[in-house]
Image (cartoon, grey):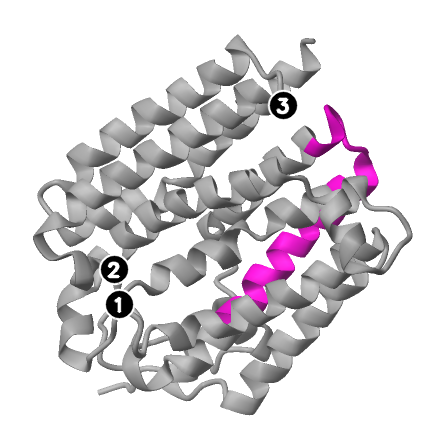
């Protein structure tokens, strides 16, 4: 009986692309749309190719670096979760030092991009890095680690303002001048969107997370999970609508928010049964909700 050929070993590049979730762009798109929305608002319209390129490429790089840190931090937990058991670090195909080295190179590349902007944005990038590294460890003892992720996934907002409006001063006062109160308001509102979609994500793995002692918002909220997700969607959309109108955005922007609200209502139908498939689909398609809001912002400013 002929023997079947053994599968060829995967290349290092293929493993690294798997490590950074290259085939799953939803993660960096969730980061990108609120960041670009803030960039357009800060610039009162088209911000220029330089800043667009910096924040698009920088977002992809930092999300990829965050995946490396997350997989190292969670490797002992991920092997008990069916969806994550075959990740490169958990399966042993990529070592911990190797994964950290890849993450460091990616973060350094993102930092080089930030260096081409303004000092306030450069200073804020250090805080962004700290929050990115802290998130995976928040799942050990904090009942709502998604709130930490919310800050990490929203920090592109103040950085966009800092890069657009920042001068040449390296002081903390320069950050306050470049990042107005409404920028922090947008960050706070966006945090609730992150809570909504990452709770949906946590609902997928709730049974596995309970077995290994992981803390997530889905576990903490219990039977109130669906209601909390929908409330978070509402806070996000209402707060962004109110802030947008206060900044002079009008009907076209509100149309984008309305399209996003319709998607949030559809997500209720996906998650109310708490099935893994429905919750994961809602999470995976959430970037379209952020895209709708961004289109409303960009189109409204372009049509003035």
For the residue labelled by badge 1, is the local secondary structure a helix, a strand or a loop?
A: loop
Q: Residue 56 location in percent, x, y?
A: 67, 47
Where does the image place residue 149, in percent across and percent down from the top left?
43, 60
Q: Disc 3 vs disc 2: which is toward the camera?
A: 2
Q: Marks 2 and 1, Cα distance to the nearest angstrom?
A: 6 Å
Q: Quadrant of the N terminus?
A: bottom left
Residue 26: image tag: none
Of the numbered discs 2 and 1, the one sitting upstream in the chain is: 1
Which residue position is annotated with label 1? 143
Count neighbours of disc 3 (C-alpha within 10 A) and say few if under 14, some if 14 to 19, many if 20 or more.
many
Residue 56 is inside the magenta segment: yes
**CB atoms of marks 3 and 2 within 8 Å:** no
Residue 82 x, y percent position in the rendering:
22, 71
Question: Dividing the picture into quarters, in which one does residue 276 lie?
Answer: bottom left
Residue 39 at what x, y percent from top left? 68, 37
Give the mark nearer the N terminus: 3 vs 2. Answer: 2
Residue named by callout 3? 298
Q: Is residue 116 above or below residue 265?
A: below
Q: How many marks?
A: 3
Region of the chain picked out in magenta, as a range = 42-67
Query: In percent of the image, x 27 and y 85: which residue is there?
Result: 2
Give the SS element for disc 3: helix
In reply to whether residue 28 is colored magenta, the answer given is no
Which badge, 1 or 3, is on the more N-terminal residue? 1
Q: Which quadrant of the view contains residue 52?
A: top right
Residue appearing at x 8%, y 52% in the figure = 223
The answer to whether residue 7 is visible is no
Residue 217's disc is: 2
């Amino acid at each position: 009986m002929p023997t079947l050929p053994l599968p060829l070993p995967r290349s290092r590049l293929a493993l690294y692309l798997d490590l950074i979730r290259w085939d799953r762009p939803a993660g960096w798109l969730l980061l990108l749309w609120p960041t670009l929305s803030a960039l357009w608002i800060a610039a009162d319209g088209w911000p220029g190719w330089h800043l667009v390129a910096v924040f698009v490429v920088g977002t992809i790089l930092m999300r990829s670096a965050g995946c490396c840190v997350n997989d190292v931090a969670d490797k002992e937990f991920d092997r008990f979760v069916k969806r994550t058991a075959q990740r490169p670090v958990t399966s042993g195909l990529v070592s911990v030092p190797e994964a950290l080295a890849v993450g460091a190179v990616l973060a350094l590349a993102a930092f080089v991009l930030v260096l081409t902007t303004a000092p306030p944005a450069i200073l804020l990038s250090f805080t962004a890095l700290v929050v990115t590294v802290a998130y995976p460890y928040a799942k050990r003892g904090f009942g709502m680690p998604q709130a930490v992720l919310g800050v990490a996934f929203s920090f592109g907002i103040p950085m966009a303002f800092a890069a657009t409006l920042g001068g040449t001063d390296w002081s903390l006062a320069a950050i306050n001048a470049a990042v107005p109160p409404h920028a922090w308001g947008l960050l706070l509102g966006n945090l609730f969107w992150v809570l909504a979609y990452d709770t949906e994500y946590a609902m997928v793995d709730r049974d596995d997370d309970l077995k290994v002692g992981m803390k997530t918002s889905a576990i903490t909220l219990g039977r109130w999970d669906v209601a909390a997700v929908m409330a978070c969607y509402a806070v996000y959309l209402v707060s962004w609508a109110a802030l947008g109108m206060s900044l002079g955005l009008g009907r076209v922007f509100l149309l984008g928010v309305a399209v996003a609200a319709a998607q949030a209502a559809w997500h209720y139908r996906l998650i109310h049964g708490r099935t893994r498939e429905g919750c994961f689909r809602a999470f995976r398609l959430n970037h379209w909700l952020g895209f709708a809001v961004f289109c409303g912002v960009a189109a409204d400013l372009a049509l003035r």
